[in-house]
Every structure is written in C-alpha cells, then in structure tokens.
Image (cartoon, helix red, strand yellow):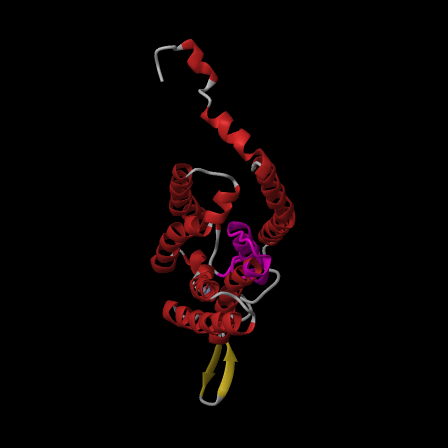
Amino acid sequence: MADFKTHISGSTIVGAAYGYWGTFHQGMSVESGLLAAGLCSVAGMLPDLDSDSGVPLRETSMFASAVVPMLMINRFRDLDLSPEAMALAAMLIYIAIRFFVVEVFRRYTVHRGMWHSIPAAASVGILAYLVMPSPAESARVYKSAAVALGFMVHLILDEIWSIDYRRGRFRLKKSFGTALKFWGNDLSGNVSVYAKLFLFAYLAWGDQAIIERLRERDRWQQPDDWQRPYVAEQREAPPPWQQWFPGRR
Ligand SMILES: [Zn+2]
C-alpha cells in the first residue's frame, strides 16, 4: 500500500488542480477554490482511518474535529443558533469526533474493508454535502465533490501501489482490488455501507426542502417595511411581566 506521505502528496496535487479548475473555469470564488483544494487534500487521508495504526487516525480526527464545526457555520445559521449555542455545538462536535467516531473506527472497521470502497467515497461526499450548506448550490456541490475526489485519489493510489514491478515483469500483490471496489466479501459490511449510502442520499435529497422551509419561515418573521415602525414600537414597550414588579425597570 502507498504510505501516508504518498497519499497526502497525491491528494494535494489533485486538490490543487481541482481548485484551479473550479476558480478559473467554473466561476467559483477564490475562497471556494482554496477550500476545495484543502478538503480534497485532507480527504486523501480519510480511507486509512480504518488502519488502526496511530498516524492517520490521530491526525485526521484532530483535523476533522477542528474544521468540521467551522464548515458547519452556515448550517448553524440556518438553525438560528446564537453565537453561544454555536460555540457549544462546536464543542459537542469536537468531542463526538475525537472520542466517539474514533472509537467506532477503531472497533468496527477492518483495514481494507468496506471503508476502502467506492460506495464509501460516495457516502463521504454526500456527508460533506450535508455538513456544509451554502447559499449557492453549485458551490456546495463543488466543495463536497472535492471530498469525494480526495477519497477516490487515495483508493486509486492504493490500487496502483498494489501492482508490483520488478525485473521487467508486473505482478499483482494480494491487496490488488481491495481498494477500488463496489462489494466486499463480507455480507454485513456490504449491507451496512449501502444502507448508509442510501440513508445519506435520502437525507441530502430532503435537505434542500428543509433549508428552503427554514429560510421561508425567516422571511415571514422579518417585518415588511411598512410594518417596521409598529414592530419597533412593540419592542420598546416593557415586557408584560413588569406590571407585577412595579419598582423594577
Ligand atoms: Zn488505503
């Protein structure tokens, strides 16, 4: 298998190209392009979360727990959270990733199991789509595709590294075909990975409608221009409970 450094270099190069392509050919903003490049680069570490050997698991989980809450800011905003609630949510996400998600990977995945697979790459892309809503749908798809792309680069590198070239002859290592795959040998693993894929796809499908409804509600709650003076008046009036405490203001 390709080592950590190879993976990171591979996904970083592809990420840089993807960022360039998005910014200069697809009309994405420079920030979106840079972010997509970074996401692609980091996503190149994700598949080896199943390897249980320190570095990828530790590095990726630390990075993810710091960055995921930041990426979710638009999501928090849609939910109408106050800044304090956002900080709290960020803390909970940090704890969830650092302790819960890492533990799940340590216990329930085997190296080169179904986490190294094409449906897993698709799931991760859709999950990224769910995590970072953005006002423009095209930017949202572009950034989440960067994550899936980085993941795929890792799988492709794993396959390339399983071809052994020695003394002018190609030989396939035993690991050949265990990264870029749609199905594994373990039935429960297959069922689990496809169940998650369909669940995420279903959620992403419904997500647009939910966000639309939240924004619609927001629009209704904003007073129209002609209402503004009345609304301001209402806000200045003392809250009703003050009649019970005449001395306090
Ligand atoms: Zn790998």
Quadrant of residue 230 within the rendered picture: top right
Magenta residues span: 112-139
Quadrant of residue 243 within the rendered picture: top left
Would you say the magenta stretch is mainly helix, strand or loop?
helix
Q: Position of residue 214 (x, y in %)?
A: 59, 41
Residue at image point 50% right, 75% down: 160
Q: Residue furthest bottom?
A: 168
Image quarter (top left, top right, bottom left or bottom right) of the C terminus: top left
Q: Position of residue 235 (x, y in %)?
A: 48, 27
Q: Position of residue 102 (x, y in %)?
A: 41, 49
The answer to whether residue 197 of the structure is visible from this angle is yes
Quadrant of residue 9 within the rendered picture: bottom left
Q: In the visual, does 21 lie left or right of 59?
A: right
Is residue 215 positioned above or below 9 on the image? above
The answer to whether residue 106 of the structure is visible from this angle is no
Number of disc labels: 0
Image quarter (top left, top right, bottom left or bottom right) of the N terminus: bottom left
Q: Position of residue 157 (x, y in %)?
A: 48, 72
Residue 186 counted in the magenta span: no
From the viewer's side, name the closer residue of 152 and 74: 74
From the viewer's side, name the closer residue of 177 and 80: 80
Residue at image point 51% right, 80% down: 171
Is residue 94 positioned above or below 244 on the image? below
Is residue 206 positioned above or below 30 on the image? above
Is residue 87 positioned above or below 160 on the image? above
Q: In the visual, does 8 lie left or right of 27?
A: left
